[in-house]
Image (cartoon, helix red, strand yellow):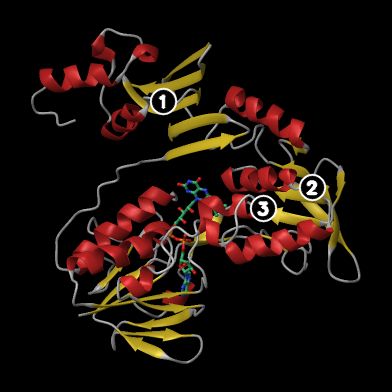
Amino acid sequence: MRHIIIGASAAGISAAKTIRQWEPADEVTVISVDERVHSRCMLHKFLSHERTAEGINFVPEDFFEKNGIRWVKGERVNRVDTGAKQVHLECGAFLPYDRLLIATGAHFVIPPLPNFREAKNVFGLRDLSDAEKIDAAAAEGKRCVIVGSGLVGLDAANALCERGVACSVVEMADRISPLQLDTTAAAAYQTLFEKAGCTFYLAEKASGSEMDGEGNITSISLASGVTLPCDFVVVAAGVRPSVEFLEGSGIEVERGVKVDEYLHTSVPDVWAAGDVAGITGIWPNAMQQGETAAKNMCGASVPYEDRYGMKNTMNFYGLTTLSLGINTPAEGDEVLLRESKSGYQRFILHDGVVTHVLIQGDISNTGFWQELVKRKIPVGDLGKSVFDLSYADFYRYDKAHASFEW
Ligand SMILES: Cc1cc2nc3c(=O)[nH]c(=O)nc-3n(C[C@H](O)[C@H](O)[C@H](O)COP(=O)(O)OP(=O)(O)OC[C@H]3O[C@@H](n4cnc5c(N)ncnc54)[C@H](O)[C@@H]3O)c2cc1C
């Protein structure tokens, strides 16, 4: 059996490893634009010079060789012919497959702001080659505008501040990292970033720019009229699943590649896993999906069960936050807040079920919250404040409700 995996990151690598374990005699080929395997989550460490490119590789150097996996690196797939079962590369070559996994992740989006798409000094941050470009820009320039303050924008700001670059961060929402944080938790980070050399422009929009004769943006103007002089720009304003090469393949695409519970696409013998499937956009989910899809490519029928949900942890300047679920309350939801010595906590409850958890500070022993949110376990009948719950409460709950598996 010939397995082809497009993508050599969280989903693709975990799939390749799984197929090799399950089917030692099968042919496994991984194709990627990436020339080096690396963790996107660690790009900020590369950018801050805390780690080298080798230092953010998440597999052993001899991974492909040792596992008998062929890696076609630095090549882009530009077409999939699902009728002939062939994958076509930009260089003109094509490779036949029996089973195909699409694990092409996502790419950043540059908004259609004046000069942004043409300028030479506007960068996104998705892979090592992006980080290398920003690294070179930071060696020359000392002022950066970052558009977007989600996790990627904050990663960039954190790394660039370490390098002594003054960062101006522009955010449309009234607080930083609005999908993960509420006002209180965001303010704590904002103070830390400001101390490190960041300036935040909240509830603001980049609306224009000035470009010099060499094609470099020299300043960004905001809707409020403020002008921010800069040497380069980092855009962290969202990503889109990398599906363009699937046009004409017959593989159905919605937000991402459409998959069923087995991560199978609409076309026989083709699966999709990771950010390209648009289910969630976090590393552990991509790995888990890669593993599940791989088992199914080997003939199993394993449904994908989301183990991690909408989970994010962040740690900047020693302050850690765990965020689970959706942080905006619906009408009638209960919002509970507590600030204590160990940190700040916020819970949203819908009909006695916790739908969002935000814990800033000490996040040890908080693993059980993930299960509570994911499984929609009611906490109202435990006779205890939500702030005092621990794993032990659910162990008892489990015993009392024999049908429930913890
Ligand atoms: C800066 C940054 C920080 C992050 N921090 C965190 C974090 O702290 N925690 C967390 O859980 N998640 C984090 N994420 C998200 C996480 O990195 C992604 O969820 C994860 O990388 C998704 O893995 P993937 O395998 O689906 O795709 P990707 O990692 O996007 O990899 C896609 C692969 O496909 C290849 N590819 C794409 N198109 C083609 C093509 N046409 N032909 C051939 N190859 C192709 C690429 O070269 C690459 O190898 C972060 C992301 C970024 C960018």
Report whether residue 327 is seen: no
The residue carrying mark 1 is 364
Q: Mark 1 belongs to which amino acid?
A: Ser
Mark toward the viewer: 1 or 3: 3
- Answer with mark 3 or mark 2, whichever residue precedes in sequence: 3
Left or right relative to 216: residue 53: left
The circle on residue 165 is 2
Q: Position of residue 404 (x, y in %)?
A: 14, 29
Residue ranking furthest to the bottom: 92
Q: Is mark 3 within 8 Å of ligand 1?
A: no
Classify the position of the C terminus by image quarter. Answer: top left
Left or right relative to 150: residue 75: left
Mark toward the viewer: 3 or 2: 3
Crowd band around label 3 with a 10 angstrom C-alpha radius: few (<14), some (14–19), many (20+):
some
Q: Position of residue 16 (x, y in %)?
A: 31, 67
- Answer with mark 1 or mark 3, whichever residue precedes in sequence: 3
- Element class at badge 1: loop
Occupied quadrant, residue 306: top left
Classify the position of the N terminus by image quarter. Answer: bottom left
The residue carrying mark 3 is 49
Give the alpha-carbon distance from disc 1 to disc 3, as whole Å: 29 Å
Crowd band around label 1 with a 10 angstrom C-alpha radius: few (<14), some (14–19), many (20+):
few
Q: Mark 3 belongs to which amino acid?
A: His
